[in-house]
Amino acid sequence: MDISTPFPFAIVGFDLDGTLLDTSLDIGHALNHALRSIGRPIVPVNEVYRLIGGGTGQTLRLGLLETGGALPADEMAALEDVLFAYYEDHIAEHTKLYPGGEAMLDALAARGVTLAVATNKKEHLARKVFAELGLTDRFSAILGGDSLGPGKAKPAPDLLHAMVEQSGGGRAAFVGDTTYDIGAARAAALPVVAVSFGFHDRPPHELGADAVIDHFDALIPVLESLG
């Protein structure tokens, strides 16, 4: 790979669930633990990816709707605590980078790109999964859905603005897999790439991204074309 040509972006930011990491099995087991605790049927773990995208709390809300309906606010809060406690204890048992992810991160770093993460997952959970996978030091900023307070999670642009600021500023692009990601990038005026292998809430080519990739091998050439 020729790295002599300046890369068009100083910062490349990523969503976490369904973009950098396949977290579906660990989230699925946590969701089903919570559902079983109140006598609900489980969601098949190979279908949980459909419910992921707006943060783990949103996954629980959707799981409840699919298995008997919503709960009152106080019961919902208690059940979220059950889910998050289980998930935190089992956060990286099955979770892994998507194919080509490590080589892609290495290649971006070799080009002098600052890497960052903006996820709707709670920040401490994002940091824990990265720590357990040995990935923390790769990222200059790791922002979660609760990092900036209520109403600041994606698709609002605030996390992406903060991601760029904490990464030292400069031209940035974002990579995601849902309307939350593409909406946030559009609101923040950042070029955005969608991955076709993620946890989509709409077909990948209908998300409104500037480009869609099927493998991380394609990310650098696509970003160069967007620059």
Image: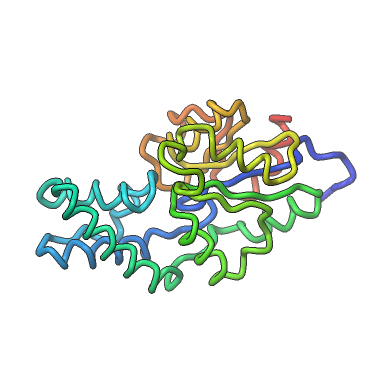
Identified at 24% across, 46% down, the residue is 62
Please tell me which residue lies in front, 152 or 37.
Answer: 152
Please tell me which residue lies in front, 210 or 163.
Answer: 163
Residue 222, by quadrant, is top right
- Left or right of residue 56, residue 127 in this image: right
Identified at 12% across, 63% down, the residue is 38
Is residue 23 depicted above or below 6 in this figure? below
User: Residue 140: where, in percent of width, then height?
Assistant: 68, 53
Residue 75, by quadrant, is bottom left
- Left or right of residue 104, residue 155 in this image: left
Identified at 66% across, 40% down, the residue is 164
How many marks can you see?
Answer: 0
Is residue 96 depicted above or below 108 in this figure? below
Identified at 53% across, 26% down, the residue is 187
In the picture, the quarter occupied by the C terminus is: top right
User: Residue 197: where, in percent of width, then height?
Assistant: 47, 48
User: Residue 134: where, in percent of width, then height?
Assistant: 61, 70
View extreme (right): residue: 4
